[in-house]
Amino acid sequence: MGALGNYLTDGSGKSLYLFTPDTSSTSTCYGQCIAFWPALLTTGAPKAGTGATAGMLGTSPRTDGTTQVTYNGHPLYYFKGDKAAGDTSGQGKAGTWYLVTPAGTQIGGAASAAASPAAAVKSGKY
């Protein structure tokens, strides 16, 4: 477990974030936002890897016809500034972007809830 605790990644180990202005499973990140925070997209049913809970995975349609992966009702995104697996430079950006715990909550910020080390493994992957 790193300094930020356990958080979700994709199958390649790239960090996944939630955007706090998204108040439902429908993304509000478009235009300039999506240029810096690309959506985690899928063409089929997303699959949970180690540490992630399959029942928390879902999808949501985007206005461009693509399908975005959601976790615990939160649309998931990458940060353009993260170059390699394990990078977390998007954490806390603009006070609205946060890593996601395996329990489906954000790490840091006002809505933070500490993840139980016994309930989560190293990094949940898709």
Image (cartoon, rainbow, N blue to C red):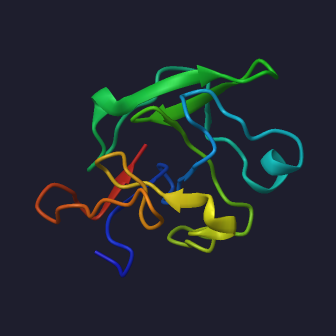
- Residue 89 visible to an observer of this rendering: yes
Determine the residue positioned at 37% across, 50% down. Answer: 105
Numbered circles on residues, count: 0
Q: Quadrant of residue 91?
A: bottom right
Establish if 33 lies above or below 62: below
Residue 20 x %, y %? 58, 49
For residue 15, side relative to residue 80 (left or right): left
The residue positioned farthest toward the bottom in the image shown? 3
The residue positioned farthest toward the right in the image shown? 32
The residue positioned farthest toward the left in the image shown? 118
Q: Quadrant of residue 64?
A: top right
The quarter of the image holding the N terminus is: bottom left
- Residue 82 visible to an observer of this rendering: no
Residue 17 x %, y %? 55, 54
Residue 87 x %, y %? 56, 73
Residue 122 x %, y %? 28, 65
For residue 109, side relative to residue 68 (left or right): left
Determine the residue positioned at 28% across, 48% down. Answer: 103
Establish if 43 lies above or below 78: above
Establish if 92 lies above or below 97: below
The quarter of the image holding the C terminus is: top left
Viewer-nearest residue: 19 or 125:
19
Determine the residue positioned at 60% across, 59% down. Answer: 97
Establish if 43 lies above or below 120: above
Viewer-nearest residue: 89 or 24:
24
